[in-house]
């Protein structure tokens, strides 16, 4: 068996146990109608820049929150709560949600990466980056890039965004696509995730999963 095949086999075993990338990833039960996002941003009071800088500084060098102590996670939750007071009205309709975002923090390490982000998974798989691209009007692309046994790999998901209300979105994902070295294939089936947008501006976006996990996204570019 080639190195690529061996690595792909290992990755697939992890992937089959817990789908990566999507927080609170659940099997699809039913489809909801898509609601397109307006390209008009709602007015709102801007958050103090020091709040935005504070939440980003707290996660720097923590491997997306994995290395934060318990009180560090509480500090993150406190700052996120303060930022939420400055959230624009109906953030799901704002063009600010579109763009390329890097996952820089999650209060539950395994939420955005499944078993890849467990203590064992982090020993085997070196996470290079975790990205989410939101494209107008309703496309979401998630990608986790990693290295394993000296080979570059990635797990990607493409989903359709549905607006549930003024802050909550649902994304229905197609089957994940795995690539390790020269090998690539799809596995599993459709799934879904729900996320509340609690704050968004030109620099960061905060989200809360349906089970309470806090996510911080940093805009790229």
Image: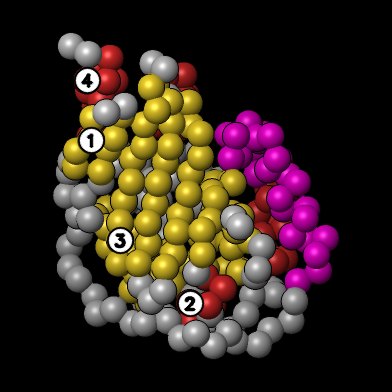
- What separation in Å lies between label 1 and label 4 (alpha carbons)? 10 Å
- What separation in Å lies between label 2 and label 1 (alpha carbons)? 34 Å
Q: Which residue is mark 4?
A: 5
Give whichever of 193, 181 is nearer the camera.
Answer: 181
- What separation in Å lies between label 1 and label 3 (alpha carbons)? 19 Å
Query: Secondary structure under badge 3?
Result: strand
- What separation in Å lies between label 2 and label 3 (alpha carbons)? 16 Å
Q: Earlier in the sequence, mark 4 or mark 3?
A: 4
Numbered circle sitting on residue 159: 3
**CB under 8 Å between callouts 1 and 3?**
no
Q: Which residue is mark 1?
A: 184
Task: Name the residue rendered at 20%, 59% in the picture.
Answer: 28
Image location of residue 80, percent across then percent down: 66, 60
Q: Earlier in the sequence, mark 1 or mark 4?
A: 4
Q: Earlier in the sequence, mark 1 or mark 3?
A: 3
Image location of residue 218, percent across then percent down: 61, 55
Task: Name the residue rendered at 57%, 68% in the picture.
Answer: 198
Quick check: can you spot residue 158? yes
Numbered circle sitting on residue 92: 2
| Nearest-to-viewer mark from 1 and 3 | 1
- Outermost residue, top side: 1
Q: Does the segment drawn in magenta span residue 58? A: yes
Give whichever of 218, 30 is nearer the camera.
Answer: 218
Q: Does the segment drawn in magenta span residue 52? A: yes
Query: Secondary structure under badge 4?
Result: helix
Number of dots carrying numbers: 4
Q: Which residues are magenta?
A: 47-73
């Amino acid at each position: 068996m080639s190195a690529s095949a061996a690595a792909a086999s290992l990755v697939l075993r992890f992937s089959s146990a817990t789908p990566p990338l999507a927080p609170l990833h659940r099997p699809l039960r039913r489809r909801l109608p898509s609601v397109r996002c307006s390209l008009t941003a709602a007015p709102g009071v801007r958050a103090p820049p020091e709040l935005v800088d504070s939440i980003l500084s707290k996660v720097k060098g923590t491997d997306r929150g994995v290395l934060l102590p318990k009180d560090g996670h509480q500090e993150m939750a406190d700052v996120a709560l303060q930022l939420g007071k400055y959230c624009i009205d109906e953030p799901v309709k704002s063009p600010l949600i579109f763009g390329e975002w890097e996952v820089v923090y999650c209060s539950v390490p395994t939420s955005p990466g499944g078993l890849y982000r467990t203590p064992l998974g982090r020993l085997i798989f070196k996470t290079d980056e975790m990205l989410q691209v939101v494209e107008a009007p309703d496309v979401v692309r998630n990608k986790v890039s990693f290295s394993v046994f000296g080979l570059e790999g990635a797990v990607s998901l493409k989903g359709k965004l549905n607006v549930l209300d003024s802050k909550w979105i649902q994304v229905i994902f197609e089957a994940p696509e795995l690539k390790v070295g020269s090998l690539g294939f799809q596995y599993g089936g459709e799934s879904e995730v729900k996320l509340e947008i609690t704050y968004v501006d030109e620099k960061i976006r905060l989200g809360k999963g349906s089970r309470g996990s806090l996510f911080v996204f940093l805009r790229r570019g």
